[in-house]
Image (tube, rainbow, N blue to C red):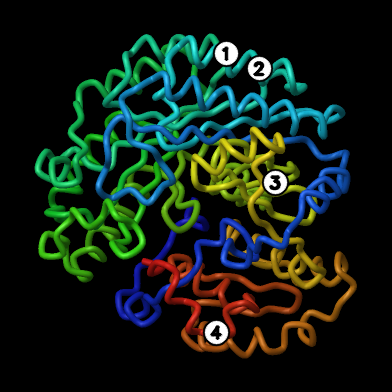
Amino acid sequence: MSNQQIVWDQEIIEKYNYSGPRYTSYPTALEFHEAYTPAEFDMACTQYPERPLSLYIHIPFCHKLCYFCGCNKVITRHHHKADIYLDSLELEIRQRAALFTERKVTQLHFGGGTPTFLTKIQFTRLMTLLRGEFNFEEGAEISIEVDPREIELDMLDHLRDEGFNRLSIGVQDFNKEVQQLVNRDQDEDFIISMVQRAKDLGFRSTNLDLIYGLPKQSAESLALTIKRVLEMEPGRLSVFNYAHMPTLFAAQRKIKDADLPAPAEKLVMLQETIENLTGAGYQFIGMDHFALPDDELAVAQREGILHRNFQGYTTQGECDLLGMGVSAISMIGDSYAQNKKDLKEYYAQVDEKRHALWRGVALDQDDLIRREVIKQLICNFTLDTKAIEAEFNLDFDKYFAEDIKLLQTFINDELVTMHEGRIDVELRGRLLIRNICMCFDKYLRDRARQQQFSRVI
């Protein structure tokens, strides 16, 4: 396991803690444009017909507003609004499914918003539709994000009956003062019961989401949350950095700057969290993700086949990703496409055109090359440069001459090592993997663009 862990170097982390993309895609969503056409999307759907399909369904509704949230959501307590949404979503699903009649669906993920805003009847309606329109592989991975505040335990039984086998539960923090300041009061005992119920029902894996850097949070209080979380033994953990950007996300304006921990305190939180999780046997997957050694993510990373997309790290890199619902993003063929982000616009366009395409980008050959380089580095902390040369018929050192110059500072600081035919990210450099990937990002040559991203730590 030691080859999957990291070494904390305070001075190095402070030196490189500037803003940058999370690389759930390359190029990033900043390069999406509205000139991307439905014809380009349809062509992309025919590009790799042998690929299996991963589906993403966006459910935008939430019962309550979490002040830290930057997701695309609609706050309401009226469940009939979900019925209206499902009417439009059904039209989109039927139109899109017709493009993939020969494909096998190996993965389905519900995100939001709060997918568990839906009632049991609404879940059954949607899952029946999806299974009727798409060809699901037996044993497909079916996962969902869960808000533990507005759900009954027996909803897990219903989800299991509908084929769901993975859960991601939003915990964020167990400290009551922190919860109140972000408008997310929740019952710790209920979350413990949920995780146990998921195990009893045979869910393959449960992920718990945590956030560090929230108002009034301290290293001590977060350590208590981590201790309680470890007692539940989730298969995966995500520990996200709270990025305070109130100019972009209106809800965050309800959080007072004075209540936020100082940057130095946030680094202590992260350092202690990493030590606690890796000390408890979790494998550091990358950036903010951890998994038990026998989890599929951890195994895939050790085997060098981990992948990354708009949902984060995944084991199914060979899939095309079809996103449906408001704001959903697809990775189909050699292109990315995003649906309308505004719900009214989504309804209007689906009603008129039966699709919700808003913008996208078709990748050129250079994008494909750089995407593969960045994916290998961010997923596996190593890059086989000879494999890149063979796959894309290029001389790596010549093609990436400018990039290697940018990488030199990381080499000088002994964070990255270049061997004959290989680039390795050293243990001291793994927390800075986003920075290292940025060296290969041609769209970031103009450093001013970084203002649009969160800090890497």
Dot 2 surroundings within 10 Å: few (below 14), some, or many (20 or more)? some
Classify 230 as above or below 86: below
Q: Disc 2 designates what residue?
A: 129
Q: Amino acid at mark 1?
A: Arg
Q: Are marks 1 and 3 in contact (CB under 8 Å)?
A: no
Whether residue 224 sits left or right of residue 294 in the image: it is left
- Where on the picture, by quarter, is residue 149? top left
Residue 125, label in figure: 1
Residue at 22% across / 35% down in the picture? 228
Dot 3 surroundings within 10 Å: few (below 14), some, or many (20 or more)? some
Which circle's residue, 1 or 4, is located before the other in the chain? 1
Residue 317, label in figure: 3
Which circle's residue, 4 or 3, is located before the other in the chain? 3
Q: Disc 4 designates what residue?
A: 411
Q: Secondary structure at mark 1?
A: helix
Q: Nearer the viewer, mark 2 or mark 4?
A: 2
- Where on the picture, by quarter, is residue 64? top left
Q: Are marks 2 and 1 in contact (CB under 8 Å)?
A: yes
Classify 33 as above or below 100: below
